[in-house]
Image (spheres, rainbow, N blue to C red):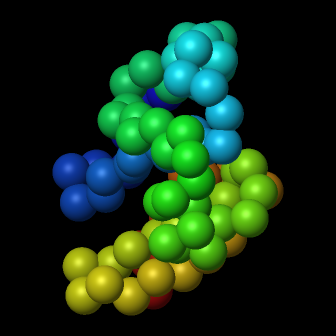
């Protein structure tokens, strides 16, 4: 996966609640090596941002405003948000 959204958008993957080895395998198997990943083995980051399930997207604007979504198209959702 590459960031096709331009230089103003940073994508960070946060795999969580699992073991590091399977998380690394998932990144390779799904082809998302092109983005930064911050493993959250114990769920601390997930809890901090209110994530309760896989495939949750959190959009954080420059001013710190957060919007939570999930199960949609990451690229389409981000394009919708930055067009507002």
- Count of marks placed on residues: 0
| One can see residue 10 in this view | yes
* Residue 41 in picture, x, y percent from top left: 55, 39
Q: Quadrant of residue 30?
A: top right
Is 71 placed above or below 60 here? above
Relative depth, front residue between 27 and 49: 49
At x 43%, y 20%, the residue is 33
Q: Position of residue 22 (x, y in %)?
A: 65, 17
Relative to 72, is 49 on the left or the right?
left
Q: Is residue 82 above or below residue 2?
A: below
At 23% from the left and 60% from the top, the residue drawn is 8
* Quadrant occupied by the C terminus: bottom left
**Above or below — where is 58 with respect to 26?**
below
Left or right, residue 64 beside residue 72? left
Name the residue nearer the viewer: 49 or 60. Answer: 49
Residue 36: where, in percent of width, then height?
Answer: 34, 35
The foreground one among 9 and 53 is 53
Q: Is residue 70 visible?
A: no
The residue positioned 38% from the left and 24% from the top of the image is: 34
The quarter of the picture where residue 65 lies is bottom left
Tell me which residue sits at (50%, 44%) in the image.
40
Residue reaching furthest to the front: 42
Percent position of residue 1, x then y:
49, 27
């Amino acid at each position: 996966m590459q960031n096709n959204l331009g230089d103003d958008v940073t994508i960070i993957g946060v795999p969580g609640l699992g073991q590091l080895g399977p998380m690394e395998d998932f990144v390779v198997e799904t082809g998302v090596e092109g983005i930064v990943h911050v493993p959250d083995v114990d769920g601390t980051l997930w809890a901090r941002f209110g994530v309760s399930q896989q495939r949750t997207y959190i959009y954080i604007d420059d001013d710190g405003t957060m919007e939570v979504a999930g199960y949609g198209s990451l690229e389409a959702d981000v394009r919708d948000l930055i067009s507002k």
